[in-house]
Amino acid sequence: MSARTILITGATGKQGGAVLTALAKNPSLTLLAVTRNASGQGAQKLISKGNNIKVVEGNLDDVPSLFKNAAEVAQGPIWGVYSVQLSQGTGVTHEGEIKQGKAMVDESIKAGVKHFVYSSVERGGDEHSWNNPTPVPHFQSKYEIEHYLRDNAGTMGWTILRPVAFMDNLEPKFPSQVFIAALRDTVGTKPVQWVAVHDIGVFARMAFESPEKFNHKAIGLAGAELTVSQLDQAFKNKTPQGMAGTYWALGAILKLVIGELGLMINWFGSDGYKADIPGLKKMYPGLMDMETWIEKESPFPKK
């Protein structure tokens, strides 16, 4: 592969960080990691991940300035872009997410980017997701950005990665047990799909390294499909404590207080993720299941 420069948003987050780590293993790439503060500790940690990483200061509320800064740091054309937006958190709105996502597409086209990888969300299968915004607002925003990318990309190549629930959002803390309680008492014995952010990074790297193969593809990403009982057993197999969830009432309160989370969990029960795990394993045999993630990546104490 000839020398190529790739701009990565969300580089200080779990997902963008996993993409940065995966791409840093390819020395032919120059990686531009976006951060709000180029002189902060977070930025210095990014640089330590690889000799081919440079930090770009900017934020997604001013994408034109971000691309201007990136061009100055790169001192050459930006070949690829990994685009991920925050969909939840303080000050985050779905309208803002859509605006940021569309602006990333627009500025990438203006900059002559050759391949654009967008991080979205799985919504019921690779084909069905195109026609299924779901009742969940932060799924709907990604649905809209996906269609904008597909309809406006022109000659710019693109790949859409659609992860399911993140294994990495499970932590050895009480809030995770409350979430599992809400999940358990909503979906019952229906399985839910999970993915390790490490593997999102792997598939992003594959898309950038083989753009012709991944061009115009939208791919759901999952490594495990488990009932809550099976999830609990996976944790019992690898850690001193299971993941059965806490009292049902606390899960019910969580769904009530955080309404959008409740909508998402209800959708898990009525519809749910449908990524093609066997097909993904053919593409990447190292795809992590839950026990592998617990053992290799998780912060949980091990047996």
Image (spheres, helix red, strand yellow):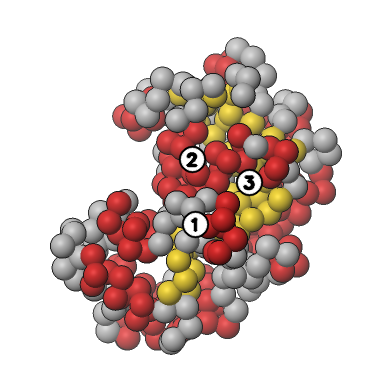
Evaluate if marks 3 and 2 touch, with contact meaning CB atoms under 8 Å apart. Answer: no
SS class, disc 3: strand
Q: Position of residue 145 (x, y in %)?
A: 70, 52
Task: Give the alpha-carbon distance from disc 1 to disc 3, as whole Å.
Answer: 17 Å
Image position, residue 164 (x, y; %)? 52, 62
Q: Quadrant of residue 275?
A: bottom right
Residue bearing mark 3:
118
| Classed neighbour count for the residue bearing mark 3: other residues with Cα under 10 Å, few (<14), some (14–19), many (≥20) | many
Q: Is residue 66 left or right of residue 265?
A: right
What residue appears at the point 49 percent right and 22 percent down from the top-left corner?
27
Secondary structure beneath label 2: helix
What residue is shown with label 2?
19
Looking at numbered disc 2 in the image, what kind of residue is underneath it?
Val
Which residue bears the numbered disc 1? Answer: 88
Q: Looking at the rendering, in which quadrant would you find the C terminus? A: bottom left
Under mark 1, the amino acid is Gln
Along the horizontal axis of the image, is 281 left or right of 107? left
